[in-house]
Image (cartoon, rainbow, N blue to C red):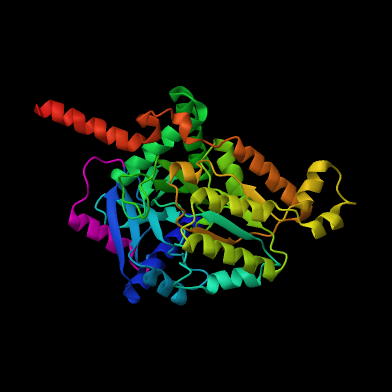
Amino acid sequence: MDTTAQAALLRIQNMMMLCKQLKLPVQFKVSRIHRQEAPSPAAAAAAAAAVAAADAADHDMEQPANEATQELAVIVHVLSDYAFKKYLQHCSASDLMLLRGLLLKVETNAAMDRILSARVQQAFLPKFENEGQDSSIADAIVQHADERPMVVTIKHSGSLVTLSSQGFAAKNSLDNEYSAGAAVLLQAHFVRLLGCEAAAQQRLAALMDALQQRQLAISFEMVTGCHGHHGQLPAGEYLVATSAHTAGSSGQPEFLSWLSFLQLCLQFGLPLNDTWILPGTAAAAAAAARELLDHLALSGCPTGEALQQLTVLVEEPDTAAAAAAAGDAVDAAAAAAAARKGVHLPGTYPHEQWQGSRIEGFVVSQGQPVAGQQGWQQLLQLGQAMQRQVVRLEQCGGQQQLQRPYQWLLEQAGQWVCTYMGF
């Protein structure tokens, strides 16, 4: 085992030990990879215990020649935000982040009593904080608005899933209605975007090849009408990409920077969220933006009106900035960029069409520093590319297999069963 693999295994062992010592509400769910049969409860318990073994030196990690092996997928399911926060309080900078959930790929010997390797296959970012429960994050974003821009996205009501070269995984499960629904919606997305099944299959194959070659995993919010919802029943079913990470050089997942993530999604035509970026040149401007967001969310403002007000907020001219940059602008586009207070990056699936007529809320985060007017110009260009990938609900033409593809498949399966049973 090379040093990278050893570091990855040690991080996982330490994480599981710390969860046990802190008595955190964390579940470990184990299943075999590329096997039809599931492991017995005893085998699953043995595998989890082996991964949690603290002292790797007590085991010979080298695999004997020609020894049969088992590959296991281990879901690390964090049952509460409390568990995640307590772990953060006690872990060190060198420890594996527990995040919101992990999917581990573990290789054992045939008897599953010795670990040969283990690494993080897919990871979920921590859940955002509700401002009513903890306003400190929003306060910090406002206070540091002169250093880093404020980034606002729409809250979509759905379920978390991740995709790697091994396929989809849900936050706490594998090979069920959540991973199946995500696979159906990704295929349907490419059909909507490209116009035919053949092109969609080619794009999907190219994406899966890239995930394998670059050891990438991509997280999505999956919105359907049959997996549970928090607000209105959505008018259509869709995915929204939220983040991406690599396996990392030392076993710690490394999330792509915000700009690299957008470029990856645009390269493969993955669905993105509506995003508003406010430079926030002063804390007062950021505080005003926060007050507007609070008003829109708490008043149950119609989605279309809320999004229009946000767009006006970032696009209305900043006369001071325009005057300062007028002499330096090399063309009309640069001058226009200088005169704006921010940038709106349009989402692939307009919320007011696909999700519903009422906004549920906004997610506010601290963005990465933008490198002067050149950086803002690059963001404007990204926005133009994202505009070309917008999918409107009317493009489905009322076809349920395009508008609600997973629900349509379930209904077709139900009709087939009824016909087969003679009902």
Q: Is residue 189 above or below residue 312?
A: above
Q: Nearer the viewer, residue 412 or 39?
A: 412
Q: Residue at x 88, y 51 (%)?
A: 328
In this rendering, the count of numbered labels is: 0
Residue 314 visible in the displayed image: yes
Taking the image as shown, residue 10 lies to the left or right of residue 289, namely left
Say which of 216 and 279 sits in front: 279
Does residue 279 show up magenta in the picture?
A: no
Which residues make up the magenta segment?
A: 34-55
Give the residue at x 61% y 47%. Answer: 345
Residue 199 on image: x %, y %:
49, 25
Outermost residue, left direction? 422
Image quarter of the N terminus: bottom left
Q: Specify whether residue 249 is in view.
A: no
The image shows residue 412 at horizontal and vertical percentages of 25, 30
Percent position of residue 247, x then y: 50, 52
Above or below, comparing residue 73 to residue 282 in the picture: above
Identified at 27% across, 50% down, the residue is 31
